[in-house]
Image (cartoon, rainbow, N blue to C red):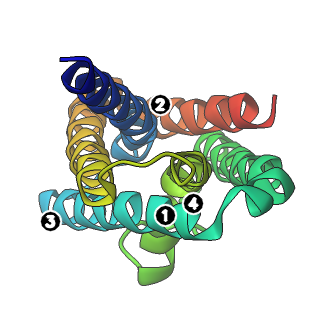
Amino acid sequence: MLEMSAAAGHMLAVLLMAVALGMDAFSLGIGIGMRGVRLLDVLKLGSVIALFHVLMPLAGMATGQYVSGLLGGVATSAAGALLLLLGGHMVYSSLRGEQVGSFDHRTLWGLLVFSLSVSIDSFSVGVSLGMFSGSVMFTVLLFGLFGGLMSVLGLLLGRRVSRSLGGYGEAFGGAILFAFGLLFLF
């Protein structure tokens, strides 16, 4: 009986972590979706983010506790700085009436940068989870499911909201990315 409650508690903890990591992808997906995104791009981004939400915790679990102490804060700070730059550039370009040329989610580079930026915290979580015994497959598949699903929902919501915001949608999306960059840094 005690063993079943411990297993249920572990599953609930993993589920809550998957939702928390997915919320990050959801929120940032709204920011990108506000720039305007095609449905095919939504599916590509969602799939790659789901893949990164599987690979990053696996890499974190393999890395272990030692690297967590060294890189945990650095990885989060790097992701925050990247989001600050991307968000700031989006706001600046939108207000100047320019198209943002440095980050295009339709290119392979843009797809990878965005997916990595929303999945980097999964690495740190994976390092922490690597110390616990549990089902690695269940954990990473749940992370991938929620990361992909919630990013698609965020992208679709951002896409819908951008239609009603008109030209200010890109600036608002950039502000969201900038705010998340600040949260990562502080």
Mark in front: 3 vs 4: 3
Q: Secondary structure at mark 1?
A: helix
The three-letter amino acid code for the residue at tag 2 is Tyr
Q: Which residue is found at the position 80% from the left and 46% from the top? A: 73
Q: For residue 167, which numbered disc appears in the image?
A: none
The three-letter amino acid code for the residue at tag 4 is Val
Q: For residue 40, which numbered disc appears in the image?
A: 3
Q: Secondary structure at mark 3?
A: helix
Q: CA distance from mark 4 to mark 1?
A: 28 Å
Q: Position of residue 9 (x, y in %)?
A: 31, 22
The quarter of the rendered structure image containing the N terminus is top left
Q: Position of residue 80 (x, y in %)?
A: 72, 45
The quarter of the rendered structure image containing the C terminus is top right
**Which numbered disc, 4 or 1, marks the residue that appears first in the sequence?**
1
Q: Which residue is found at the position 57% from the left and 62% from the top? A: 60
Mark in front: 3 vs 1: 1
Residue underneath mark 4: 100
Q: Which residue is found at the position 34% from the left and 57% from the top? A: 136
Q: CA distance from mark 2 to mark 3?
A: 23 Å
Q: Mark 3 and mark 4 in contact? Answer it, CB < 8 Å.
A: no
